[in-house]
Image (cartoon, rainbow, N blue to C red):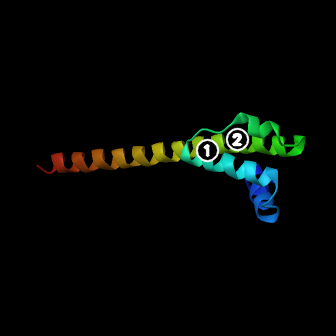
Amino acid sequence: MRAIKKARRLILSQPQTLAAQTLSKLILSLENETEFSIADLYRLNLKEFEMAISLLEEWRLDRYYEGKAKLFDVSVHYHQLVAEAAKAGASK
């Protein structure tokens, strides 16, 4: 199971725990690109700490794929514009 899914389950099932509070702060920080105190991670037990690290890895990987998808969309759009311009130039 992915860390993102595990974190969601933990936050929903145990919202009052230190782990839920820390993971939710980490997620909000990642999404909003704001600062997060690394010391908060060290307060977690080893299993929760490892989940947070896995969450960071998945977040980074997902962000890479999102960027790749956006780049693909731009490339497709660019080629469509070039093709349309070529057709317009050929019909003159």
Write down the quadrant of residue 39 in the picture.
Answer: top right
Q: Secondary structure at mark 2?
A: helix
Q: Residue at x 82, y 55 (%)?
A: 17
The percent coordinates of residue 91 (x first, y second) are 15, 51
The percent coordinates of residue 59 (x first, y second) are 66, 44
Q: Which residue is mark 2?
A: 56
User: Quick one: 88 or 43, which is closer to the camera?
Assistant: 43
Query: From the viewer's perspective, is residue 1 above or below residue 30?
Result: below
**CA separation, marks 2 and 1?**
8 Å
First-in-chain label (2 vs 1): 1
Write down the quadrant of residue 56 in the picture.
Answer: top right
Q: Quadrant of the N terminus?
A: bottom right
Q: Residue farthest to the left?
A: 92
- The amino acid sitting under disc 1 is Leu
Query: From the viewer's perspective, is residue 35 above or below residue 92?
Result: above
Q: Which residue is mark 1?
A: 30
- The amino acid sitting under disc 2 is Leu
- Disc 2 + disc 1, Cβ < 8 Å: yes
